[in-house]
Image (cartoon, rainbow, N blue to C red):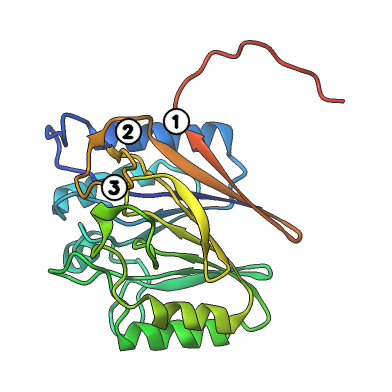
Amino acid sequence: MMIAHITDPHLVRRQETLFGLDPMHRLDRVLTQIQRDYADVRLCVISGDLTDRADAEAYMMLRERLTNFPIQTRLMLGNHDDRAEFRSVFRDTAADAHGFIQYFDDIGDLRLIYLDTLAPGLTEGKLCEKRLSWLAETLTAAADKDVAIFTHYPFRRIGLPHFEGMLLSNPDAVMSLLKAHGRVRHIFCGHVHVSMSGQWDGIPFTVSAGTAHQILPDFSSRNARFVATTPQFDIATLDGNSFRVTRVEAEERKVLAISAGV
């Protein structure tokens, strides 16, 4: 089974650009490549910062584009999004009992959990007590399943000074729940516009640089240098006891040769 992970489209209104880029064009390149080269993907997840300024028109553009995208897609919110504006366009998106845009899918023996870490007005993300309670219940109900977590905000430090104070504000509360479950296989993140992978408290994670602008990784400066590298996405493959994540760049490349398999 394969799952596509996309993050940080940062869509703007028609005729507008962002840092001189057309975010919708860059997202379209990713969606087109997924549809063409990975048509057997079971599900696609876009993990937040769907828009750059939470414009209703940008959400409408996304809805229109997904109408022609044949792969079932799950949408999440990031710090650049707005719940009310999002819900005004995507009325059918699931939410918990308190209106937070968080929900889950069960696919076989795997539970995919999509978290709402948006804290309006703050640069940090947060899972409040209501959202933590929902997560605890959702994990408990999946005691017999493997779990993959999708979150906009990374949970713990990522080694980039620019993002100190811009991650999840209560990571210990979240990680304690994930560790207690015992079968959380992977955490997928966005937000930082940098590709990286590693472990938090023994749980593997990957961060995708996303489809809009990216940031050059700088481990000493608090300044962030925005750049326009190739839009990217991840393909997660669950195969028995193996869980693999492959990074793909949405770029046309010349095939130099084809080597036959043995």
115 or 39: which is nearer to us? 115
| Label 1 CA crowd tier, 10 Å (few <14, some 14–19, many 20+) | many
Please indicate whether residue 111 sits to the left or right of residue 189 in the image.
Answer: right
Residue 246 percent across, percent down from the top left: 58, 43
Q: Measure the C-alpha gap from mark 3 to mark 2.
A: 29 Å
Looking at the rendered structure, the secondary structure element under dot 3 is loop
Label 2 amino acid? Arg
In the image, what residue occupies the spot 18% across and 49% down? Answer: 52
184 or 251: which is nearer to us? 184
In the image, what residue occupies the spot 68% across and 70% down? Answer: 109
Please indicate whether residue 237 sits to the left or right of residue 226 in the image.
Answer: right
Q: Measure the C-alpha gap from mark 3 to mark 1.
A: 30 Å
Residue position for label 1? 250
Residue position for label 2? 26
Residue position for label 3? 220
Please say if the residues under marks 1 and 2 sit with CB atoms less than 8 Å apart. yes
185 or 170: which is nearer to us? 170
In the image, what residue occupies the spot 31% across and 38% down? Answer: 216
| Label 2 CA crowd tier, 10 Å (few <14, some 14–19, many 20+) | many
Label 3 amino acid? Ser
